[in-house]
């Protein structure tokens, strides 16, 4: 079914200043939701009762409640691939069978973490995690956010097929004290398999007699891993119905379980579980992922926003924007409805971003005075991630909150070059601290928000056929089959690698 945005086109909307003009305190209270250690402030968006009523009606028309039930109950929600999307089962919400299977897979992962910690592989100092996309971005984010100064096993993540990435990962470490995690849902991804071969060579050259014996496979396709050469005892499986970009809760999160310890990993799952329950039970108007999606849809459908920016005012969350890029753009970057009909309205905006305060001195000029509207999301933590002088954290938070205020207020002067239109929207997510539980809840919030966007857009967020054509063509080029390619591509190949016919 197609989304219907007629209700957004009806009348002129009040500005943010107008929305804040009467009873601003009540507005802030009404549009602030506190959940799982996160304060979601949506008051600096244009959402008001009229808009929210319209979105609530639209949620009814698109059967958001029924779709949520299907998602959380483990029913088929991915029609093009005829399967469920059971990432929440990893956190305890799902069909009883899926929850039980996830529990068993987690128990297996925990047992392996414990034998590694007990020294079954000898002294281990480093884990090289090899994967790409959803098989790398989650573990990378978790370790960067939570794994600083833990003093445990160092985790290095390699995703790019560019050998420079692998060269960097193996720099200065001893293959005899290193384990490899081969992370691939399908265990067929070309980049991951090539990187894995490269790591095998490095291990062999470094005096490891049985490099395959140092590989732990994290996959939903155990047969392929066995075929490749991983012993069944070192395979940590997960369910086929857990999508790649939703997989950090499964065995794909193994490096975090090893690097942070099992207790930390479990806290993360529990935090995500708390967000699942909030999404499952809260009224739409008090439901953080739902309300955030309403705001997203207002800006894409009514204000033609083609991008949304996410700025983490916390160094520990510097990888969050790139994690969200895959989650949001691979899920909702679609042109047809779940039934295959072409849509005649925009779907996913482009997610981009970075860290504050750096962004302020580089790209915020456009956010304040550019001609395109960019809804901005600010994320900050009450507690700092360091022991240095409080001045750092005070400055960081002051800057974060000032940016949201400035975007909204604007400033009029006699000089047009020095004037700011204002009325530019932002959301602020203030978290208590960057802990496993809160990060788990935060990521689960983004998953559900992406889902709600998809339901109201009428699209399927759980397939990603758009990535296949490029893969096929790369394979064809690698195999020397250039005949079907255009003249430009042929000339580039020739210029870079010589005439394939020679
Ligand atoms: O090509 C896209 C994609 O399939 C992503 O959806 C996925 O996260 C990534 O590649 C890696 O896939 P795999 O885990 O099967 O190696």
Image (cartoon, grey):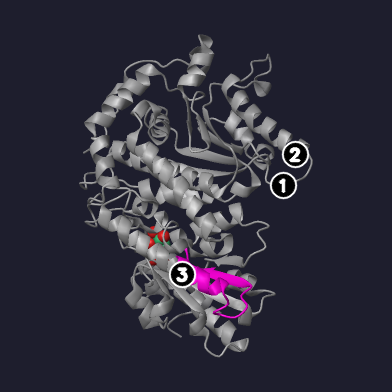
Say which of 410 and 326 sits in front: 326
Which residue is found at the position 48% from the left and 17% from the top?
Answer: 27
Residue mark closest to the camera, 2 vs 1:
1
Residue at (35% x, 57% y) in the render: 243
Compared with 114, 342 (above or below) is: above
Q: Is the residue 49 above or below the residue 336 in the image?
A: above
- Mark 2 Cα shell of 10 Å, populated few (<14), some (14-19), many (≥20): few
| SS at mark 1 in the image | loop
Q: Is residue 348 visible?
A: no
Residue 125 belongs to magenta span: yes
Q: Identify which residue, 366 or 100, lies in the foreground.
A: 100
Q: Earlier in the sequence, mark 1 or mark 3?
A: 3
Q: Residues within 10 Å of mark 1 (few under 14, many from 20)?
A: few
Give the CA separation, mark 2 to mark 1: 9 Å
In the figure, is residue 3 to the left or right of 329?
A: left
Tell whether 359 sits left or right of 222: right
Give the residue at mark 3.
111
Q: Earlier in the sequence, mark 3 or mark 2?
A: 3
- Kindly identify the residue that appears in the image at 32 percent across and 21 percent down: 53
Find residue 296 and report its horizontal and vertical position in percent: 42, 33
User: Disc 1 and disc 3: Cα gap in Å?
Assistant: 33 Å
The picture places residue 374, in percent across and down from the top left corner, at 51, 33
Mark 3 surroundings within 10 Å by alpha-carbon count, few (fewer than 14), some (14 through 19), many (20 or more): few
Q: Is residue 95 visible?
A: yes
Image quarter hosting the N terminus = top left
Q: Badge 2 is on which residue?
A: 392
* Residue numbers of the magenta segment: 110-132
Q: Secondary structure at mark 2?
A: helix
Which residue in the protein does label 1 denote?
Answer: 386
Q: Is residue 294 magenta?
A: no
Residue 165 placement, left or right of 225: right
């Amino acid at each position: 079914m197609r989304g219907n945005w007629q209700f957004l086109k009806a009348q002129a909307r009040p500005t943010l200043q107008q929305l804040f003009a009467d009873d601003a305190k009540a507005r802030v209270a009404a549009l602030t939701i506190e959940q799982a250690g996160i304060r979601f402030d949506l008051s600096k968006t244009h959402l008001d009762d009229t808009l929210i009523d319209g979105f609530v009606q639209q949620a009814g028309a698109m059967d958001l409640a029924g779709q949520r039930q299907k998602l959380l109950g483990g029913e088929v929600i991915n029609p093009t691939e005829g399967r469920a999307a059971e990432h929440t089962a990893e956190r305890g919400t799902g069909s009883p069978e899926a929850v039980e299977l996830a529990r068993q897979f987690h128990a297996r992962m925990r047992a392996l973490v414990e034998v590694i910690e007990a020294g079954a592989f000898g002294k281990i100092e480093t884990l090289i995690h090899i994967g790409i996309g959803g098989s790398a971005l989650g573990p990378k984010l978790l370790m960067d956010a939570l794994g600083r100064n833990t003093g445990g096993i160092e985790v290095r993540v390699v995703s790019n097929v560019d050998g420079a990435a692998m060269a960097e990962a193996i720099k200065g470490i001893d293959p005899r004290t290193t384990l490899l995690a081969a992370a691939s849902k399908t265990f067929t991804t070309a980049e991951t398999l090539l990187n894995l071969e490269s790591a095998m060579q490095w291990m062999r050259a470094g005096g490891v007699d049985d490099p395959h014996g140092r590989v732990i496979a994290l996959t939903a396709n155990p047969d392929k891993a066995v075929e490749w050469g991983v012993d069944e005892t070192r395979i940590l499986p997960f369910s086929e119905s857990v999508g790649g970009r939703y997989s950090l809760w499964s065995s794909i999160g193994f490096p975090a379980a090893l690097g942070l310890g099992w207790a930390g990993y479990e806290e993360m799952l529990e935090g995500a579980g708390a967000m699942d329950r909030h999404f499952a039970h809260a009224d739409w108007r008090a439901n953080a992922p739902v309300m955030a999606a309403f705001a997203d849809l207002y800006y894409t459908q009514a204000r033609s926003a083609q991008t949304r920016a996410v700025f983490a005012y916390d160094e520990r969350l510097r990888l969050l924007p790139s994690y969200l890029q895959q989650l949001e753009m691979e899920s909702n970057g679609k042109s047809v409805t779940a039934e295959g009909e072409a849509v005649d309205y925009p779907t996913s905006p482009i997610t981009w971003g970075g860290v504050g305060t750096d962004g302020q001195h580089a790209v915020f000029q456009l956010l304040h005075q550019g001609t395109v509207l960019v809804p901005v999301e600010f994320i900050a933590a009450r507690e700092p991630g360091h022991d240095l002088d409080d001045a750092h954290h005070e400055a960081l938070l002051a800057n974060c909150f000032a940016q949201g205020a400035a975007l909204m207020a604007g400033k009029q002067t006699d000089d047009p070059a020095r004037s700011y239109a204002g009325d530019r929207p932002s959301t602020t997510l203030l978290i208590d601290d960057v802990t496993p539980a809160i990060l788990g809840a935060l990521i689960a919030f983004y998953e559900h928000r992406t889902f709600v966007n998809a339901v109201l857009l009428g699209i399927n967020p759980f397939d990603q056929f758009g990535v296949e054509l490029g893969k096929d063509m790369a394979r064809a080029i690698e195999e020397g089959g250039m005949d079907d390619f255009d003249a430009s591509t042929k000339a580039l190949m020739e210029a870079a690698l010589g005439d394939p016919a020679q």
